[in-house]
């Protein structure tokens, strides 16, 4: 069993930056894929970014070039979000899966076994 805890959400103006962090209860990142998803009110959950154990990264087209996913500390993966837009406002969830997300799985929530409780991001214009 793996517990995931997100932190770092908040409110920022358009163009601002936030860093979301996800800390796992035990060492996972060398054999588990890590993903970030978001869900805005009234919208479906969407994959934002994912990181394979070997370091391969995936990003949604909507965040490519603005968001960066990386390991930043022991058992912690962080999502650096720059140039934030109102459309980025959502609840953000960290998720972990056993194995490799791969290009056709990384943004599909049902492949992830473990989920955090979410952290809210609000971007105001």
Image (cartoon, rainbow, N blue to C red):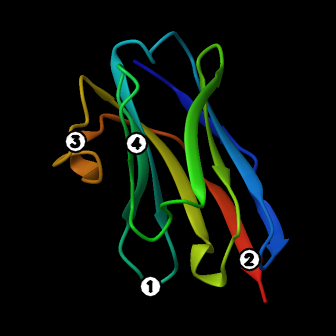
What residue sits right under mark 1 in the picture? 42
> In the orientation shown, which residue stands out farthest toward the left?
104
Q: Where is residue 120 in the image (x, y as percent from the top left)?
A: 67, 62
Q: Between marks 3 and 2, how big is the CA–CA gap?
A: 29 Å
> Where is the N terminus found, in terms of image quarters?
top left
**Earlier sequence position, callout 3 versus callout 2:** 3
Given residues 42 and 125, the one toward you in this image is: 125
Q: Against 102, is 36 above or below?
A: below
Location of mark 3 (residue)? 111
The crowd level at tag 1 (other Cα within 10 Å; few <14, some 14-19, many 20+) is: few
Q: Name the residue under label 2.
A: 123
Q: How far apart are marks 4 and 1 (CA)?
A: 23 Å
| Front disc: 3 or 4 | 4
Label 3 or label 2, whichever lies nearer to me, is 2
User: For this rendering, which residue is in front, 11 or 30?
Assistant: 30
Horizontal side of 45 relative to 36 (left or right) equals left
Q: Which residue is drawn at 82% across and 69% down?
A: 11
Q: Earlier in the sequence, mark 4 or mark 2?
A: 4
> According to the image, label 4 marks what residue?
50
Residue placed at 73% from the left, 76% from the top?
A: 123
Q: Residues within 10 Å of mark 3 (few under 14, many from 20)?
A: some
Q: Is 67 drawn above or below residue 40 in the view shown?
A: above
Q: Quadrant of residue 66?
A: bottom right
Circles 1 and 2 in contact, beta carbons < 8 Å: no
Distance from the alpha carbon under mark 3 to that under mark 4: 12 Å
Circle 2 crowding by C-alpha within 10 Å: few under 14, some 14–19, many from 20: some
Location of residue 41 with respect to 74 vertically, above or below? below
If you read the primary sequence from the N terminus, does the residue marked by circle 1 or circle 2 appear first? Answer: 1
Bin the neighbour count of mark 4 within 10 Å (Cα to Cα): few under 14, some 14-19, many 20 and up.
many
Element type where label 3 sits in the image: helix
């Amino acid at each position: 069993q793996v517990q995931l805890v997100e932190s770092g959400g908040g409110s920022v103006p358009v163009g601002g930056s936030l860093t979301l962090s996800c800390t796992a209860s035990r060492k996972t990142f060398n054999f588990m894929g890590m993903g970030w998803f978001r869900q805005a009110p009234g919208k479906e959950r969407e994959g934002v970014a994912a990181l394979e154990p070997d370091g391969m990264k995936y990003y949604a087209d909507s965040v490519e070039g603005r968001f960066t996913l990386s390991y930043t500390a022991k058992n912690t993966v962080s999502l650096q979000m720059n140039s934030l837009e109102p459309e980025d406002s959502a609840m953000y969830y960290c998720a972990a899966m056993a194995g490799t997300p791969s290009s056709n799985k990384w943004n599909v929530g049902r492949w992830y076994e473990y989920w955090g409780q979410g952290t809210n991001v609000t971007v105001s214009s």
